[in-house]
């Protein structure tokens, strides 16, 4: 097969997440991220059954689709699917106040490889992460590799 130049694309069209309950997840993303459901884009089968909703999330830069897919949502439980950028540790602290006011479970601030990290599991256990764009400036030995909130992937086999 002869290689050719990579065809052009126009960026990300949307992000799709599997969920077990469309309404619950739409409410959660609305409360946590200020997402607004675009009901005119609801996805329905020919019999009228709703199988996906589209959300407009401020600052995301693309739309978020919540797709009813309980098996995949269960299989991805604990996976950190999306990391949003926040400025610094003060921004992480502001998010903590916001999440606490909503009664939403989250990690404490975690020392990541470069910056501070806050992990917020959605209703299905998928982990939304907020990561600082400003480095924390801490020594590499301070990185919390053992934190249950900092996924480092599967350990290699011996």
Image (cartoon, rainbow, N blue to C red):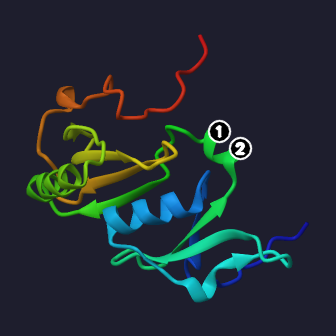
Q: In this view of the protein, which residue sits in the foreground, 38 or 139?
A: 38
Residue shown at the point (31%, 27%) measured from the top left:
147
Res. 37 mark: none
Q: Is residue 19 left or right of residue 129?
A: right
Residue 44: x and y in percent read: 74, 76
Note whether residue 10 is visible.
no
Q: Point out the residue furthest to the front here.
A: 48
Q: For the C terminus, which image quadrant?
A: top right
Residue 35 position (above or below residue 19):
below
Q: For the N terminus, which image quadrant?
A: bottom right
Q: Point out the residue furthest to the left here.
A: 90
Residue shown at the point (65%, 63%) measured from the top left:
67
Q: Secondary structure at mark 1?
A: helix
Residue shown at the point (55%, 80%) measured from the top left:
11
Q: Secondary structure at mark 2?
A: helix
Res. 75 mark: 1
Residue shown at the point (32%, 45%) measured from the top left:
119
Q: Is residue 103 left or right of residue 42?
A: left
Answer yes or no: do the residues labelled 2 and 1 have beta carbons within 8 Å? yes
Q: CA distance from mark 2 to mark 1?
A: 6 Å
Q: In this view of the protein, which residue sits in the foreground, 10 or 90?
A: 90
Q: In this view of the protein, which residue sits in the foreground, 83 or 19?
A: 19
Q: Point out the residue furthest to the right here.
A: 1
Res. 71 mark: 2
Q: Point out the residue furthest to the bottom here.
A: 40
Residue 134: x and y in percent read: 16, 58
Q: Quadrant of residue 22?
A: bottom right
Note whether residue 88 is visible.
yes
Q: In this view of the protein, which residue sits in the foreground, 111 or 59?
A: 59
């Amino acid at each position: 097969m002869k290689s050719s130049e990579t065809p052009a694309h126009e960026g990300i069209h949307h992000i799709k997440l599997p969920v077990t309950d469309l309404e619950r997840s739409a409410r959660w993303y609305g409360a946590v991220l200020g997402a607004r459901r675009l009901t005119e884009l609801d996805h329905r089968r020919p019999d009228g059954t709703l199988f996906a909703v589209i959300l407009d999330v401020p600052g995301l830069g693309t739309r978020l689709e919540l797709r009813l897919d309980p098996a995949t949502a269960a299989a991805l439980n604990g996976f950190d699917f999306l990391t949003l950028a926040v400025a610094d540790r003060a921004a992480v602290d502001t998010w903590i106040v916001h999440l606490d006011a909503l009664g939403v479970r989250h990690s404490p601030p975690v020392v990541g490889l470069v910056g501070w990290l806050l992990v917020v599991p959605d209703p299905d256990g998928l982990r939304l992460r907020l990561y600082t764009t400003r480095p924390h400036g801490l020594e590499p030995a301070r990185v919390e590799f053992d934190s249950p909130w900092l996924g480092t992937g599967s350990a290699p086999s011996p």
